């Protein structure tokens, strides 16, 4: 499930960056970032990860899960955290409410679609990638982690490829 979530999150981040370039809607006046704000990358990523983790927890509650913590309580706390984070990004002037709602909607939709695809199709075919012990082989794990670092890390992209985030001062 973790490998599925990481690969899906990376695909979601790439999809979101593409949507930002296509929609090309400015951030609110006064925002320091110069890149487009629609849809919010933070809202999309947070929503994707939250929905995927919750779907995994609710459909495959691990046997070690403490019985004193009902999974629905985790759902409530996670949704509360997501909403609080989105409110903070709006109050900080980083995004408009529509940018946050669209970002969260994109992430949630991608998460549900990816989770469903993994559960119905991909998990059946992934078995041959795993070792006899059920663990991800080291070369595959290294590739996934490096790919994730390049996609998600601004500082690593800057060091490797010379990219940097644009600000309004540029």
Image: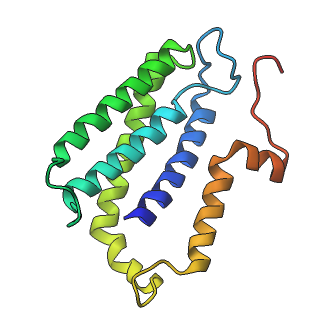
Q: Nearer the viewer, residue 66 or 118?
A: 66
Please state the horizontal and vertical placement of residue 45, each as a whole percent of the image. Answer: 48, 41
Q: Say which quarter of the image contains residue 34.
A: top right
Q: Does residue 11 sit above or below 124 in this rendering? A: above
Q: Give the camera-side residue of 125 and 155.
A: 155
Left-right relation of 142 to 63: right
On screen, residue 57 versus residue 17, left or right, reads: left
Q: Residue furthest bottom?
A: 132
Residue 64, by quadrant, is: bottom left
Residue 162: horizontal and vertical position, in percent? 85, 45
Q: Residue at x 84, y 21 (%)?
A: 170
Residue 26: quarter of image: top right
Q: What residue is rendered at 52% in x and 54% in y?
A: 11
State whether residue 40 is above or below residue 136: above
Report x, y in % for residue 80.
30, 29
Give the color scheme: rainbow, by chain, secondary structure or one colour. Answer: rainbow
x, y percentage for residue 46? 44, 39
Left or right: residue 115 versus residue 103 is left
Q: Nearer the viewer, residue 98 or 158?
A: 158
In the image, residue 61 sits, relative to residue 123, either above or below, namely above
């Amino acid at each position: 499930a973790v490998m599925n979530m990481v690969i899906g999150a990376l695909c979601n981040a790439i999809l979101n960056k593409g949507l930002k370039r296509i929609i090309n809607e400015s951030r609110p006046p006064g925002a320091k970032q110069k890149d487009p704000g629609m849809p919010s990358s933070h809202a999309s990523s947070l929503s994707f990860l939250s929905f995927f983790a919750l779907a995994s927890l609710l459909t495959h509650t691990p046997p070690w899960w403490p019985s004193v913590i009902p999974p629905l309580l985790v759902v409530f706390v996670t949704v509360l955290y997501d909403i609080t984070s989105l409110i903070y990004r709006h109050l900080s002037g980083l995004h408009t409410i529509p940018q946050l709602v669209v970002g969260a909607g994109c992430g949630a939709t991608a998460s549900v679609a990816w989770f469903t695809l993994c559960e119905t199709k991909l998990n059946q075919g992934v078995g041959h990638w795993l070792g006899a012990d059920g663990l991800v082989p080291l070369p595959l794990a290294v590739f996934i982690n490096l790919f994730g670092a390049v996609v998600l890390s601004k500082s690593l992209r800057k060091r490797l490829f010379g990219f940097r985030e644009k600000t309004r001062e540029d």
